[in-house]
Image (cartoon, rainbow, N blue to C red):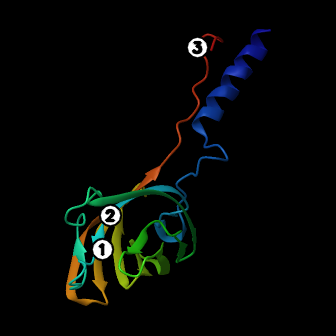
Amino acid sequence: MHRIKYWAIALISVLTICPTQNEQAIAQARGGRVNLTGRWRVTSPAFHSIIPRETGCHSGSLPGSRLPATSTATLNIIQKGSSVAIPPFRSWVNVRQKRSGVFAIANSKVSNNVLTWTERGGGFTSSFKGTISKDGKKVTGRVFCQHTSGKTTAQGPFSLTRIVSKTVQPPINGRG
């Protein structure tokens, strides 16, 4: 009976240390590079073009609105080699033309410890460039925005933070 109890404790201990299927482990690729596959929280500035005198891209909330100055979203990123699949996470609105849509993501890639991608839609073009932390849990960098309505450009910081699910703790003394 005691032998089974010790095996059960050992098994539970191993299972709580190892990542589950739903939890993406931070995998190391060749050359010590971090694999970005997993769930991430992205935070970046909101951008707008001022209407009616559109003059390019501006950072922050739209004047006179209660919209936040930053946008936050949760992403599922998939990396294969140097190519990275980043799903669209922001939307655009053109009040004058009564149109809206989701930004298209293009040119996403990893080179050494730098992640870059471009986002386009509604006349906006945003370029993201960030440095991947050594432990693979964070990407920090700058985003640069342009709009077809003028020469004014905007920029701001962005960050990606890896979301790791909590591991299940074994019950104490067999009770839970």
Q: Nearer the viewer, mark 2 or mark 3?
A: 2
The amino acid type found where label 1 is placed reads Val
The answer to whether one can see residue 12 in this image is yes
Between 1 and 26, the one lying in front of the other is 26
Report the residue at 52% width, 77% height from top: 82
Spatial distance from mark 1 to mark 2, Cα to Cα?
A: 8 Å
* Residue 176 in the figure: left or right of residue 73: right
Residue 30, given in percent of the width and then of the height, sits at: 54, 70
Category of crowding for the residue at label 1, using alpha-carbon neighbours closer than 10 angstroms: few (below 14), some (14–19), many (at least 20): many
Say whether marks 3 and 1 touch (CB < 8 Å). no
Between 148 and 111, the one lying in front of the other is 148
Q: Nearer the viewer, mark 3 or mark 1?
A: 1
Say whether marks 2 and 3 touch (CB < 8 Å). no
The amino acid type found where label 3 is placed reads Ile
Query: To which residue does mark 3 refer?
Result: 172
Residue 73, given in percent of the width and then of the height, sits at: 44, 57
Q: Is residue 161 above or below residue 110?
A: above
The amino acid type found where label 2 is placed reads Ser
Query: To which residue does mark 1 refer?
Result: 143
Query: To which residue does mark 2 refer?
Result: 44
Say whether marks 1 and 2 touch (CB < 8 Å). yes
Q: Quadrant of the N terminus?
A: top right
Q: Is residue 70 above or below residue 82?
A: above
Category of crowding for the residue at label 3, using alpha-carbon neighbours closer than 10 angstroms: few (below 14), some (14–19), many (at least 20): few
Q: Is residue 50 above or below residue 168?
A: below
Callout 2 secondary element: strand
